[in-house]
Image (cartoon, helix red, strand yellow):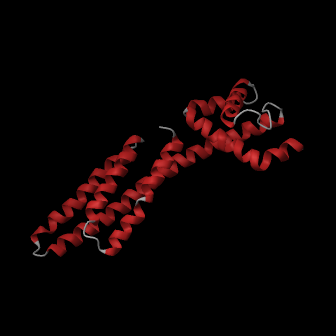
Amino acid sequence: MPLFAQIEMIHEQLRGLAPLVDRYEAGDLEFPRATAEWLRGAERVLAMHRTPEGAELPALRASIIAAGEQARGDETRATRRRAANVAAAKSIERAEELLREQHQRAARRLEHFEEKLIEAVTAAVLIGLIPFPPTDPWEEWLGRVWTSLVAHKATRPTTVYIASSLSSPDRLYILDVVLSRLNELELSVIVTV
């Protein structure tokens, strides 16, 4: 799965935390069940990314059930509910940590290659390899720019490095980010110099 898609999926999963915390604060009786459902979603997200951390999430779901079961010896339902709520809150905290770590790893990886591509694109602009301004639709222009970068001896090593490390969608994603940034802010300065 492309890194930019992983980042978006994790970000979307993390957005579901605020409503869960609101339920916890409100004393919602369904908080442990809702937490277990959110954990299932987080588990699916991490499984799609094939991360070993995803294996910890079923254990977190089980800890919520176990907390309620361990408290069964007590006479009151409130005690069991409190134990399940505490376990659910701890599970959310750990799952959020795992998701954020994966999000940061994917984002750092993309940023690394984005920096490398900035160097290659800047060199390509300076030697006149990239036609500017774009005359084709943006997507077609991205494809032509990548092809030009691959073909030129000055930029080929960087493109080979990026191509061997990232999927095609990720390469075009960071190329789009780099060219958009240069197009909006810096390319006019580089071209006029």
Residue ranking furthest to the right:
193
Residue at horizontal 72 percent and vertical 23 percent from the top: 151
- Image vertical order of residue 138 relative to residue 14, above or below: above
Residue 187 horizontal/vertical position (percent): 80, 44
Q: Is residue 12 left or right of residue 64?
A: right
Residue at horizontal 89 percent and vertical 44 percent from the top: 192
Residue 101 seen from this side: no
- Image vertical order of residue 128 relative to residue 43, above or below: above
Give whichever of 28, 177 is nearer the camera.
28
Residue 171 horizontal/vertical position (percent): 60, 36
- Image vertical order of residue 73 relative to residue 168, above or below: below
Residue at horizontal 79 percent and vertical 33 percent from the top: 131
In which image quadrant can residue 74 be found?
A: bottom left
Q: Is residue 100 left or right of residue 31?
A: right
- Image vertical order of residue 30 relative to residue 111, above or below: below
Residue at horizontal 61 percent and vertical 46 percent from the top: 111
Residue 181 horizontal/vertical position (percent): 71, 47
Q: Quadrant of the C terminus?
A: top right
Q: Is residue 28 left or right of residue 74?
A: right
Q: How many marks?
A: 0
Residue 85 seen from this side: yes
Residue 153 horizontal/vertical position (percent): 75, 25
